[in-house]
């Protein structure tokens, strides 16, 4: 039974293989409600496979996966009503204006008053001044903000952001970071996959590192920092960065 105390996401012994390629080898983690959980890993670590299973786009070979209290295999329709997924590239229609993109999704979700829904989201994501412009004229950051706004239509309690700042310039990345912080401030649960360690360091309440198909560490940034030797003090104390922690734990620090 789903309650406010039930984790937003529960994953136990998740496994997925493609013939002889074992992508997920027994993954375990939980995501609390109302925060940002970052799933870190190199290319090919299995991050996108995990997200596709969580969002019911792919069936697991084994394991138990529950999203918003629903089993992804036996209650897939309930899971899909509970989530939204934003992939690595903004899925906006560049021919339509920002407002038209939002209204289209609102109509597809059979919501009352799509125009009001669109205007509210444009205001929330600071896109009102660009509402009447074609999305093709938007900057990368604006396009990504519009994409995330579209994913919020219907008020899903859980959002998957699969490498949301891929290909964006530094300013656009900061815009997306602010958007993610605003989402969690309003109670939305965010599962973020990323290769950018500074992104996880800035945004995540909890961080898990996926390496060779398994979660090798799961905790807060402070928890992860305690896994390395204490900082040496010469003239200035230097705390380990998340990048140093990641490279050390995955054995790729050369």
Image (tube, rainbow, N blue to C red):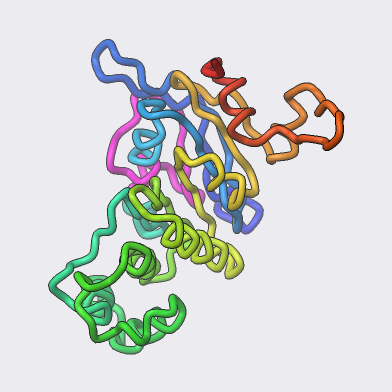
Judge left or right: residue 28 versus residue 231. left
Residue at point 77%, 35% (across, down):
238
Quadrant including the C terminus: top right
Q: Position of residue 197 (x, y in %)?
A: 54, 39
Q: Which image quadrant is residue 125 in?
A: bottom left
Magenta-drawn stretch contains 181: no
On screen, residue 74 above or below 119? above
* Viewer-nearest residue: 171 or 194: 171
Q: Magenta part of the protein: which range?
A: 54-76
Q: Position of residue 99 (x, y in %)?
A: 27, 81
Q: Which image quadrant is residue 201 in?
A: top right
Q: Position of residue 110 (x, y in %)?
A: 25, 76
* Viewer-nearest residue: 37 or 3: 37
* Viewer-nearest residue: 125 or 119: 125
Residue at point 45%, 61% (across, down):
171
* Viewer-nearest residue: 190 or 228: 228
On screen, residue 117 above or below 77? below
Q: Position of residue 104 (x, y in %)?
A: 21, 75
Judge left or right: residue 32 versus residue 59. right
On screen, residue 140 above or below 24? below
Number of labels in the image equals 0
Magenta-drawn stretch contains 67: yes
Residue at point 58%, 39% (across, down):
30
On screen, residue 85 above or below 49? below
Q: Outermost residue toward the left? A: 95
Residue at point 41%, 23% (across, down):
24
């Amino acid at each position: 039974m789903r309650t406010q105390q039930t984790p937003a996401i529960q994953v136990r012994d998740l496994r997925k293989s493609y013939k002889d390629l074992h992508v997920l080898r027994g993954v375990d983690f939980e995501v609390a409600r109302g925060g940002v959980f970052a799933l870190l890993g190199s290319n090919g670590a299995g991050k996108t496979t995990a997200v596709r299973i969580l969002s019911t786009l792919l069936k697991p070979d084994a394991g138990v996966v529950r999203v918003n209290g629903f089993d992804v295999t036996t209650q897939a329709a309930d899971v899909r009503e509970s989530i939204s997924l934003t992939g690595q590239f903004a899925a906006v229609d560049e021919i339509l204006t920002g407002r038209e993109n939002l209204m289209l999704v609102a109509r597809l979700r059979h919501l009352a008053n799509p125009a009001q829904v669109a205007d509210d989201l444009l205001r929330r994501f600071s896109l009102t001044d660009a509402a009447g412009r074609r999305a093709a004229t938007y900057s990368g950051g604006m396009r990504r903000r519009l994409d995330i706004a579209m994913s919020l239509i219907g008020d899903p309690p859980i959002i998957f952001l699969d490498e949301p700042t891929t290909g964006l310039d530094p300013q656009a990345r900061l815009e997306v970071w602010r958007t993610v912080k605003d989402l969690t401030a309003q109670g939305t649960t965010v599962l973020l996959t990323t290769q950018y360690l500074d992104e996880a360091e800035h945004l995540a309440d909890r961080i898990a590192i996926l390496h060779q198909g398994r979660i090798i560490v799961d905790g807060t940034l402070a928890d992860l920092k305690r896994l390395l030797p204490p900082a040496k003090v010469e003239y200035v104390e230097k705390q380990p960065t998340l990048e140093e922690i990641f490279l050390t734990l995955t054995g790729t620090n050369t």
